[in-house]
């Protein structure tokens, strides 16, 4: 009787082991986010836009700084000729001007950083949404990010879909109508008028 029970138990066990469990394949991939942001056309355009704005606004500020330096050089040569009272008054004016120029430089850098930050956040949000939709459409269970903010310590190259994502994002970006009709260089020219 015991032998029969052991044989039945082994038979059930053998039959259950022979059944292949239905295992869904987990499809994974990763995107190198640092490469993505370097090669994505919209990110390049955004960077170029703010670089041009920084150069244009920086030129205006640089002209004021050059005038200040010239005034400071003239002050040193005139200080002995015009006396100590004049030198103190003029020196205080130059210090105040130097401080104002420093504040203007900081304000310009902060303004450009804030404006570009808002647009960059929007761009990153759009890229994340695109990757999520891409993953769903192509049957991925997981798409990891690598690069500056690495969430994957190792991945085989065959799972790298960075180039595919860049190509599709660039194609999508090229197909979208541009909301900003005027290039950054023309904006600076119009501001002068």
Image: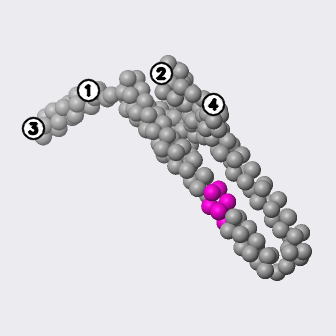
Q: Is residue 124 visible?
A: no
Q: Is tag 3's residue or tag 4's residue first in the polypeptide sequence?
A: 3
Q: From the top left corner, tell me how far across and down residue 16 is, in percent.
A: 23, 30
Q: From the top left corner, tell me how far across and down residue 94 is, in percent.
A: 73, 68
Secondary structure of the residue carrying numbered label 4: helix
Residue 8, compared with residue 105, is above or below; it is above
Q: Is tag 1's residue or tag 3's residue first in the polypeptide sequence?
A: 3
Secondary structure of the residue carrying numbered label 3: loop
Q: Where, by quadrant of the figure, is residue 88 drawn?
A: bottom right
Q: Is tag 4's residue or tag 1's residue first in the polypeptide sequence?
A: 1
Q: Which residue is mark 1?
A: 19
**Principal SS element in the magenta part?**
helix
User: In which quadrant is the C terminus drawn?
Assistant: top right
Q: Is tag 4's residue or tag 2's residue first in the polypeptide sequence?
A: 2
Q: Is residue 90 visible?
A: yes
> With 99 as the anchor, is 119 left or right in this view?
left
Q: Which mark is residue 1?
A: 3
Q: Nearer the viewer, residue 166 or 106?
A: 106
Label 1 – label 3 distance at C-alpha: 27 Å
Q: Which region shows up in magenta?
A: 99-105
Q: Is tag 1's residue or tag 2's residue first in the polypeptide sequence?
A: 1
Q: Which residue is mark 2?
A: 176
Label 4 – label 1 distance at C-alpha: 70 Å
Does the CB distance between marks 4 and 2 fall below 8 Å? no
**Residue mark closest to the camera, 3 vs 4:** 4
Q: Which residue is mark 4?
A: 186
Q: Where, by quadrant of the figure, is residue 184 drawn?
A: top right
Q: Nearer the viewer, residue 82 or 35?
A: 82
**Residue mark closest to the camera, 4 vs 2:** 4
């Amino acid at each position: 009787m015991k032998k029969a029970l052991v044989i039945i138990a082994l038979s059930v066990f053998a039959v259950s082991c022979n059944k292949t469990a239905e295992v869904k394949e987990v499809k994974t991939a990763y995107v190198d986010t640092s490469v993505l942001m370097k090669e994505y056309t919209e990110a390049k355009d955004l960077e170029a836009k703010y670089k041009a704005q920084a150069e244009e606004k920086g030129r205006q500020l640089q002209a004021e700084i050059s005038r200040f330096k010239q005034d400071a050089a003239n002050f040193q040569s005139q200080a002995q000729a015009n006396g100590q009272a004049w030198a103190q008054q003029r020196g205080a004016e130059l210090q105040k001007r130097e401080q104002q120029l420093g504040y203007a430089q900081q304000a310009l850098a902060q303004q450009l950083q804030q404006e570009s930050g808002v647009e960059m956040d929007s761009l990153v949000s759009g890229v994340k949404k695109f990757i999520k939709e891409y993953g769903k459409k192509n049957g991925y269970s997981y798409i990891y990010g690598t690069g500056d903010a690495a969430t994957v310590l190792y991945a085989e190259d065959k799972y790298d879909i960075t180039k595919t994502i860049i190509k599709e994002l660039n194609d999508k970006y090229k197909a979208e109508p541009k909301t900003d009709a005027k290039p950054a260089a023309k904006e600076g020219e119009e501001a002068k008028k």
